[in-house]
Amino acid sequence: MKPDARLFSAACDALGVIPDEALMVGDTVDSDGEAAAIGCTFSHLSLPRARGALKSALAAVIGE
């Protein structure tokens, strides 16, 4: 259960990616931010601005 970093490790393993290549977009720094503890990039998604925040987070990663 979040914020246990093992959850994020298991997700990366299931996806076949190393944490340094993963982006975790979440709405709660306290629980979702733990992904950074294993090396994932973390982007905080503010719910009132969810659509724009997600687009901005992804643009930084995919170069748009």
Image (tube, grey):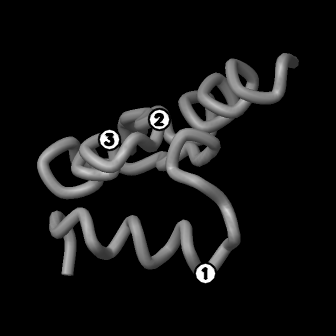
Give the label on residue 26, or none: none
Instruction: Kindly identify which residue carries mark 2.
Output: 41
Q: Position of residue 3 (x, y in %)?
A: 16, 64
- Between residue 36 and residue 62, name the one nearer to us: 36
Give the label on residue 36, or none: 3
Q: Residue at x 66, y 60 (%)?
A: 17
Where, by quadrant of the figure, is residue 4 drawn?
Answer: bottom left
Q: Earlier in the sequence, mark 1 or mark 3?
A: 1
Side (left or right) of 3 relative to 39: left
| Circles 2 and 3 in contact, beta carbons < 8 Å | yes
Instruction: Kindly identify which residue carries mark 1.
Output: 14
Viewer-side label of 1, 2: 1
Specify the quadrant that holds the N terminus: bottom left
Q: Residue at x 24, y 63 (%)?
A: 5
- Between residue 61 and residue 56, name the one nearer to us: 61
Q: Residue at x 23, y 50 (%)?
A: 34
Relative to 18, residue 11 above or below: below
Residue type at mark 1: give it: Ala
Mark 2 → mark 3, Cα distance in angstroms:
6 Å
Residue type at mark 2: give it: Thr
Side (left or right) of 54 relative to 31: right
- Between residue 41 and residue 25, name the one nearer to us: 41
- Label 2: element kind: strand
Q: Earlier in the sequence, mark 2 or mark 3?
A: 3
Within-10-Å neighbours for mark 3: few <14, some 14–19, many 20+:
some
